[in-house]
Amino acid sequence: MGLPAFLDFSSKIRLHATIVGMLFTLDTIVTLALGIALPVEGKHVPPELAPHMHVIKNFLIVAGVLNALFTLMYWVGFLKRQRWCLTVCIGFEAVAITLQFISLLGAMLQLNAVGFLGCLIALALNGYVLLVTLQLRKANSNLSVTQQGYV
C-alpha cells in the first residue's frame, strides 16, 4: 500500500531532505542558544525555580549537544548517502515522536491549550521529518552501482 500523492516526496526528495536538514540544524542552534543564554540567577528568575535553574541549563546544553550529534549524522547520511546514519536518525525521530505524543497527552489532561498546540506543531514537524527521512533512505537504497560512482 503506497502513500497518498500529497505525502509522496520522492520526486523532489533532495529538496525535502535539505529542508529537514535545516530543521535539524535550526533545532540544534536554538537548543544550544537557550542552554547558554538561560539566566541561572538574578531578578528574572522566579524564586521557586531558582534552585533548579542549574539543572535546567545543564539539561538544555546536553540536549543541544545530542541534537548536534544527530544533526551531523543526518547530514552525513544525506550528503554521503550513508544508510546507517539515516537509520540512526529514524530511530531518534521515532523516540522523539513517542515522547512528544506523551507530552501531547499530558497537555490535554492539564487543559493547557498553549502546551497542546506547541506539542501538536512539534509532532507534525517531526512526522514530516520522519517521513522524508524514510523516503530518503529508500531512495538511497535504490541507487545503482554506477550512480554511486563505482562504475
Image (cartoon, rainbow, N blue to C red):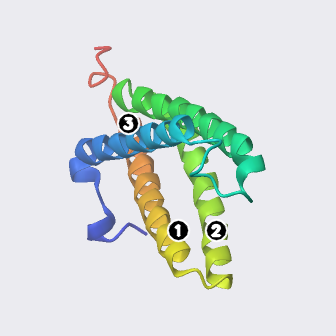
Name the residue carrying label 1: 119
Kindly identify the residue that appears in the image at 44 percent across and 43 percent down: 30
Of circles 3 and 1, the one toward us is 1
Tell me the amino acid under the disc marked 2. Ser
Tell me the amino acid under the disc marked 3. Asn
Question: In the rendered image, is residue 43 in sight?
Answer: yes
| Farthest residue, direction right | 51
Q: Are marks 2 and 3 in contact (CB under 8 Å)?
A: no
Tell me the amino acid under the disc marked 1. Cys
In the rendered image, the quadrant that contains the C terminus is top left
At mark 3, the secondary structure is helix
Measuring from the top left, give residue 122's x and y in whole percent.
47, 62
Above or below residue 115? Residue 19 is above
CA neighbours of label 3 inside 10 A, class few (<14), some (14 to 19), many (20+)? some
At mark 2, the secondary structure is helix
Residue 103 circle label: 2
Measuring from the top left, give residue 17's x and y in whole percent.
32, 43
Distance of label 2 from label 1 (alpha carbons): 7 Å
Kindly identify the residue that appears in the image at 65 percent across and 42 percent down: 41
Between 65 and 96, the residue placed more toward the observer is 65
Of circles 2 and 3, the one toward us is 2
